[in-house]
Amino acid sequence: MSKILYKPLEKPLSMLCKVEITEKTGNKEDYFFKTFSVEIFPHKTSFWSGNQNIDIVRKPISPNNLPDNNADAFAQQISAVLYQLTIKLGLNGVPSAVEKQHELWQKWLNIRENLADTFTGDWVEPALTKLDVKMLPGETLTPYIMQDIFLNEYFRNIYDAAFIGNNFYCKRTVYGLCPSPIQFNEKWLLQDSATGQSIKFSGKWDKIPDQAGFDDWLKTKTDDHLSEIRIEGLYQLDHITGWCNAIESFYTLTTNRYRKTLTITLTTN
């Protein structure tokens, strides 16, 4: 049994994320894509900046703070909340609404209270306040959905994965392929290279009958019964920084007459 070694971030990472959605019914094909820059800083206390840029909080531990008062744990708890959204996609594949926003807000308030009690320092409240603005229910959440899709791909809890013979099996929830979250059974294969480590992953939908109205949504696209939903991709770790510097994720929903793909690509600038 082995785990991936975690390294604290020492220098900013500058990356480009591209999200592509393709829907094909018969001879008709619709294509949508969106690109945005991602910057992860080692010593910033702001999660989000602007409409298309992402700041991930990483804060050094002050000598007078408790040993467990670190922003790594803080960021992990926050990111778990940020990407757990149920979204609705419009006819052109663009996210149009966020479901259960008030429930999400209540969940955030509960976690916010716990974080405020757990962490100390003058950086905590400003960071929480910035998150308050982002998490408020309303239309303002929608522009950030693509960023939440990115977080769902980037934060995979890879440092907790216990590989046996370079293999790891897990269940993972995916957002953005269809209006409701989809749970996948995934297999990860850990590989070493001259430039670092990589995780090759593959899996298929762990189908739950009529999951959150999924069948009703599919009827708006095709009369076919669902054939399958699959995922495959690659998650690359840089040997110097220890952080992910490239992602390729391919999600495919296929029936006899309908096909939808969600492609997420992350590259380092």
Image (cartoon, rainbow, N blue to C red):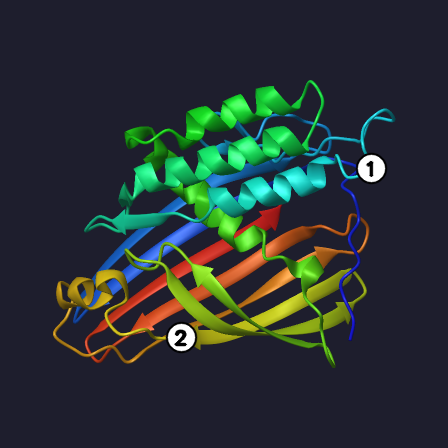
Residue extending furthest toward the right: 63
Indicate the position of residue 146 as horizontal and vertical percent values: 41, 43
Q: Is residue 230 left or right of residue 168?
A: left
Q: Name the quadrant of the N terminus.
A: bottom right
Indicate the position of residue 130 as horizontal and vertical percent values: 51, 23
Sequence-first disc among 1 and 2 = 1
Q: Is residue 135 left or right of residue 89?
A: right
Indicate the position of residue 73 as horizontal and vertical percent values: 68, 42
Quadrant of residue 58 within the rendered picture: top right
Q: Is residue 34 left or right of residue 66?
A: left
Asked if residue 239 shows in the view, the reply is yes
- Residue that label 1 marks: 67
Mark 1: which secondary structure? Answer: loop
Label for residue 206?
A: 2
Q: CA distance from mark 1 to mark 2?
A: 40 Å
- Few, some or many residues within 10 Å of mark 1 (<14, 14–19, 20+): few
Residue lying at 61% horizontally and 71% vertically, measured from the top left: 200
Residue lying at 30% horizontally and 59% vertically, measured from the top left: 178
Residue type of the residue flagged with mark 1: Pro
Asked if residue 269 shows in the view, the reply is no
Residue lying at 60% horizontally and 34% vertically, measured from the top left: 115
Q: Does 88 sit above or below residue 215? A: above
Label for residue 263?
A: none
Indicate the position of residue 35 as horizontal and vertical percent values: 44, 42
Residue type of the residue flagged with mark 2: Asp
Mark 2: which secondary structure? Answer: loop
Q: Name the quadrant of the C terminus.
A: top right
